[in-house]
Amino acid sequence: MTTLEPGKDRGGIELRQLTKRYGKETVVDGISTTIAAGEFFSMLGPSGSGKTTTLMMIAGFADIDGGQILVDGADIADMPPQRRGFGMVFQNYAIFPHLSVTDNVAFPLRARRLPSDEIGRRVREALELVRLERFADRYSRQLSGGQQQRVAIARAIVFQPSIVLMDEPLGALDKNLRFQMQVEIKEIQRRLGMTVIYVTHDQEEAMNMSDRIAIMNHGRIEQVGRPAEIYENPTSNFIARFLGEANLVPGIVESVDSDVATLQTNGGLVLRARAGADLRVGSAAHLFVRPERIDIAPAGEMMTNPDSGNFATGRLIQTSFLGNILRHAVEIEPAVVVTVDVKNSRADLFRAVNQAATVSWLAADGVILQR
Amino acid sequence: MRPSRFNDGTTLIVPAVLLLALVFVVPLIWFFVRTLAGIGTFPEILSHVWSVVTSKAVITAMRTTNWISLIVTLLVLLISYPVAYYLANNRGWRFTLVLFCIIVPYFTSIIVRTYSWMVLLGRNGLVNQVLMQLGLIHQPLTMLYTEVGVLIGMVYVLLPYMVLTLFAAMKAIDPSLMRAAQGLGAGPLYAFARVYFPLSIHGVVSGSLIVFILSIGFFITPALMGGPSDVMIAMLIERSVEITFDFSSAAIMSLLLLFVTLVLYSIYYRLTDVRRMMGA
């Protein structure tokens, strides 16, 4: 695998105030971010958030209405797609149906007029990398979805691009295969040291593979950071709800003291948590806490976590069995239901629906977010 | 429930098949059998068939027919490909306008269209007048009653068949494939040559076969616009019937034409895979 190695420090991308309008609608609204060479960077967001349009502008298939795209410092706005030299993987694979697997993978090399012995060698290496050597002579209609996806990946990396763009490449695969392909793509990316810009609406996919995730909404980047960072410290309700399960307890900010704040719920409970950005006393806010960070016990029973920052007693209204976890819904106040996830262990499980229950969590596990 | 004979729809095509058999297949067979049987014994029939098929008039007419059909097919293909490409890659009013211009003449009688071309291409026709006014030519061009006239007329009449066939083939090409080709480093020409054209080739072959099949049976346009040397096989058949009353020769030539057409059609049938299109 000596030839499939792009330059280690090529492949950095910078977006500056990148903007795209369709008629009066601004679909990408002044995005700025820097993607380091060799980074796995995901753009995650609901449909219509502008993530695919951003990728299409980087690829050169959509015109830029404002801002700049710099690749290793050079503006690529005037470059046609075929000269940008990015590898591309499309959602529907876009395997050429009239060409065999070998010819598909050789396509970018032939377009670059490489000598045929080198084409043969590189195609073999790329097929080895995606473990498709045995399928070299097949056509796309003779391949499964996962195999077609591997062909698309081999074709995107065979010419050693320093940057590979992927547009929801696993969207059409079933769940088990999807996870396996995530691991494979990540492994190939790490091995070749290439920059990957990955568009997806699947949060697990983004968290599993990415070095950093940009969460997009309404044509803007709402938050960008490492997966764990975004998961633990969402900066807005939208992020909290979009990435994973989240409890958002409404209330009024009672006090803000540098990094700790308190929130008074409508029912009069006072809850402590870390302070989010721009928090003002007296304004409406939500307390955010992940379901797996909350403990639950029958009311009055000894809590496993006596120093927990927050307690609330309510009524267990539902328990859902999800296999690896049990998901409890506890109404701690009228119309305020807290979700509590408990690992399915062999210990006696607390499943007494309609019983009084106490929930508790550490102040450090919650964040109070401006509404 | 037991499957009924009515469920698979076979019964529904019975009236159409009956009608076709009664008014087309039966009279055709009756005509061939009667005229050929009138010649005499079987060896006599064979020798007559042989003498008609190898006669100078038939060979010349077949050569002319094939030559004109070939040129027409190539010209139609060359003109239709860009038009079909435009249709397949545009939407909205542009698409509608071009499609309208292709389809509307399709619904007009061939005779009317052929006479229109005669008015345009005649010695004092519009085309010659405009060219002379512009000073491009000093003598009117002879276009009518020549092979050029036949070609112009036939190309025009046959254009929609090719455009629509190519359009259907091109519309089936996944647009993301061209995008993928470009994204992977292919320039527009390379992407067209290596991806788009190969994927449209079955439309090219089907369209060409349709146009060629229709061309070899053409009568009105070459009869009205062609010169004395542009005798196509259909015109020869007409002359045998109308002028020399030689029904047996007409029958043999018709059979020859039918045979060539069926051979070409069987190729077309295989290529387009009618059965798959019908979902069987």
Image (tube, coloured by chain):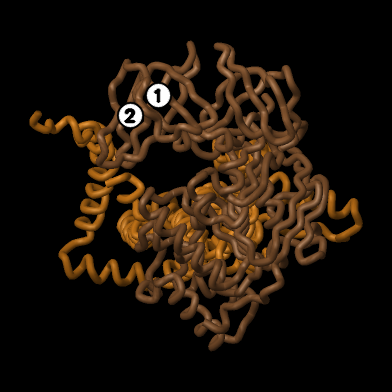
Q: Chain of mark 1?
A: A
Label drawn at residue A329: 1
Q: Position of residue B34 (x, y in %)?
A: 22, 51
- CB under 8 Å between discs 1 and 2: yes
Residue A220 picture quarter: top right
Mark 1 to mark 2: distance in Å?
8 Å
Apparent side of residue B135 relative to residue A250 in the rendered image (left or right): right
Q: Secondary structure at mark 1?
A: strand
Chain B drawn colour? orange
Label drawn at residue A320: 2
For mark 1, does the 10 Å Cα neighbourhood hold few (<14), some (14 to 19), or many (20 or more) residues?
many
Q: Position of residue B120 (x, y in %)?
A: 73, 46
Residue B80 picture quarter: bottom right
The quarter of the rendered structure image containing the C terminus of chain A is top right
Q: Nearer the viewer, residue A56 or B160?
A: A56
Judging by colour alone, the chain drawn in brown in this rendered image is: A
